[in-house]
Image (cartoon, coloured by chain):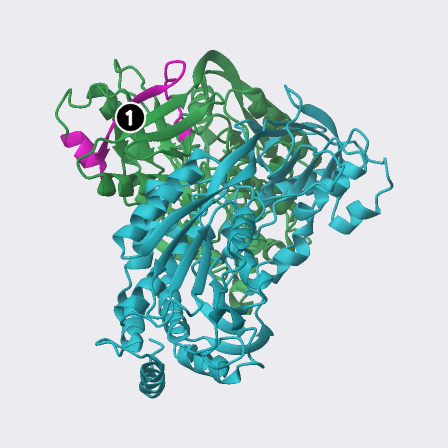
Chain colours: A cyan, B green
Amino acid sequence: MYKSALTLAALSSAISLSAQEPASVSLAEIADKALEQDTIAWDFVEGITTEVGPRQAGTEAEARARDWAMVWLNANGFDNVANEPFEMDTWVPGDVHRASVTAPYMQNLVVQPLGNSAATPEGGIEAQVVYFPTLDDLIAAPEGSLTGKIAFVSHEMRPSMDGSHYGYFGGARFAGPGIAAQKGAAAIVIKSVGTDLHRNPHTGTTRFPEGVSAIPAAALSVPDAQNLERMFERAGDAPLSLKLELNPRRLGMTMSGNVVGEIVGRNAALPPVLLACHIDSWWNAPGAFDDGAGCAIIAAAARNVRKAGQPLRTIRVLFAGAEEVGLFGSVAYSKAHIDEPIAVGLESDFGADRVWRFESNFRETNPDLHSLIAKSVARFGVADSSIRASGGADLNIVRDQKGAIIDLQQDGTRYFDLHHTPDDTLDKIDINQLRQNVAVWTTVVGILANEDRPILTGGVNPSAPAVMEQ
Amino acid sequence: MYKSALTLAALSSAISLSAQEPASVSLAEIADKALEQDTIAWDFVEGITTEVGPRQAGTEAEARARDWAMVWLNANGFDNVANEPFEMDTWVPGDVHRASVTAPYMQNLVVQPLGNSAATPEGGIEAQVVYFPTLDDLIAAPEGSLTGKIAFVSHEMRPSMDGSHYGYFGGARFAGPGIAAQKGAAAIVIKSVGTDLHRNPHTGTTRFPEGVSAIPAAALSVPDAQNLERMFERAGDAPLSLKLELNPRRLGMTMSGNVVGEIVGRNAALPPVLLACHIDSWWNAPGAFDDGAGCAIIAAAARNVRKAGQPLRTIRVLFAGAEEVGLFGSVAYSKAHIDEPIAVGLESDFGADRVWRFESNFRETNPDLHSLIAKSVARFGVADSSIRASGGADLNIVRDQKGAIIDLQQDGTRYFDLHHTPDDTLDKIDINQLRQNVAVWTTVVGILANEDRPILTGGVNPSAPAVMEQ
């Protein structure tokens, strides 16, 4: 659909120039085929959502997901498939998640706890609610003014293609509970950091500052939060009371792990290309968009590149564990492998909708490669950008090494309709957009894995020790 | 927006001809104003969803809804506002609604019980699932073949403007549980009779045949049902087991009631115009579309007609109780008032999207009136139809009297995305489409309430005894 005979020819030529072992099928042809009929990525994401489902970090469900992924990688031609275990401090949500307005109206609201929320006392708590339309309003509340009360923080997040509202309005979740706790609140409920109007709250991690005890912290679905806002409007000066019952708990240290697998390259001395995603999801979310699709895309791309012949560099996939709850897998991977240089890192963790923009952090230091990649994916409807790539959550090692990073930005317009909710199911994936992702990734990873010069800086002598590259 | 100067003038003239007491503001002007800026219907549906919320038939929540509605009707100029109580055999859903696949995969599924479902034994039941892609497949299963098993019935319902898929595919819910029970099933789960892809199952009544004991019967959300279908596909010959836990129960006889109110007409001897909706909703659904909007539309229309001067006939609104669970209010109303003729009945119970088609059951017997009404609403984008109106669930009395009926058909494309789910919230209402409903209803009810001849047959002498009219 995005095919152009001219750029296609240019790309084939570019790739065969840098590959030392020309393949019988060109990467361009393989990418075209992926665009039209890829089944590998779909098989992965259908499989993990159907046969595993939700996979909360540090639990047996995440362990089942690791086992499932290793079986899949081995069955799909990956080498050196392994689980790299690490310990983590594990929080689980419990199974009692109830809220009801008790005065001046009576109505149940739909809530889910935020990651790291404390439990309410047995039987729940009932208290007056104080409404803050924005996080800034909560910040402005006098110290101690919330003692014994429940804070309700709202916001006006809207869908955006680049997802930038998440960073801006997400503070209600990231920081709101800690701030409310510091001001003495007994608990906090927030409007879900989400953009849909369904009764499925968006969970996600919140962090309490050092020395501040966790309080019960929960997300209302957006319609429930809007209903609560209307209740405040209609109630006038009458106090509004909420009863909240949550039973999350901490399990202490349990095991998580990172799953890795490789397409081994011809030159083991060259640093590998690292493709990252995360294997865990929230307990309530089957994790199709977040991040089954990401793992599916990177695995399908790596496999596709191999079909064009053994690449020069090794391609390593990293299915990180425990991303959602604090990037534990990404941190553990960096700590374990910090001395092993990575040539370039890419992550897929923003759903399954089409890639629309290409960014790198070597546009100025290696303009030829940047430009070659940009031109190679233009035919898939991907535009070049001068925004500097910074990588996703699971690329800690590359950032720690100050290495090369590429961001293949996906259309995030729908992403926060589904993020961290039960609605993150397979049916949300548009197979044509998923295939476009695979085609783009196949093209980009194919170029990178067959590039003999350093990615970040270009023309350094390829015979120099690999460790010098970055 | 739909305004046409020509038809507007024709309508004004038609209405003022039949009205004995010309008003200072014409109905056409009032309808136009409703189209642009009605706030009455919105106030009703915002109020009942915010201040009451879900209102399961026969429970205290439905009683609060009746109280709320009577306050609203009195505050909005209705006369003879009353609750007409009746007894009903009440079922309530309980609060434990759990399902999980236990083999060959492990994953929780989202379920909600169907109305009249039995409870599972304490601790739930775990059994092999037998998959039936359609209700016909279940019907074809040999007697006794389901003994001790859980039936899973799916279907391929799709959105339709006229809602006709509900009748056709809804049998999985209406009849499936009774059929499964007759074949010895321990329980049944169905794909929700709904058209959305959110994890909010659609409940609704099921009926067990005389002499057949109720079994646990629940709806899976559509994504969960699709997931279960995929599990069967992937599991091959391996048996699939489900654990199901539900605790609904029967309360015995409790009180429900019908709320009525009137705009009193000038001629008490003429039968009234009856406008119906229902006040109850399922326990899980705030009932914005089903049927807060319907009550809002009929109440706003009746109030608007009064603004054009006291109508000739009385307009009665009937907010029926206990519709969802078996039309108990409609039946009770007919039984209590069968000897009091109704001039014509209309019901609003299909959401809040625009009216697109006008139907009556007097097109052949009173073609002039049918044609006048059709022409009066064409300017709002409503087309005439030769389909014979049969009325909705709360018009039992009119059907029992073999009286005149009008159906103002709404666009139902979105209706079964929301029907009987937690997602039936205020935000789903498009205020512009709600206003079009009010404009159309105001126009139609204004004509009917000022018509001195019998609605069904036209030219009978208006001085004849009212009871002869029908």
Q: Toward the viewer: A311 or B292?
A: A311
The vertical placement of B183 against A365, above or below, is above
Residue A182 lies in the magenta stretch: no
State the quadrant of the C terminus of chain A: bottom right
Q: Is residue A351 visible?
A: yes
Q: Which residue is mark 1?
A: B177
Residue A229, position as x, y percentages in the image: 69, 42
In the image, residue A323 sits, relative to residue B51, either above or below, namely below
Q: What's under tag 1, amino acid-wise?
A: Pro
Q: Is residue B125 magenta?
A: yes
Front one among B400 and B455: B400
Q: Please report the bounds of the magenta region as a residue range.
A: B112-140
Task: Give whichever of A159, A317 is nearer the camera.
Answer: A317
Q: Residue at x 25, y 31 (%)?
A: B240
The chain carrying label 1 is B
> In which quarter of the view is residue A8 placed?
bottom left
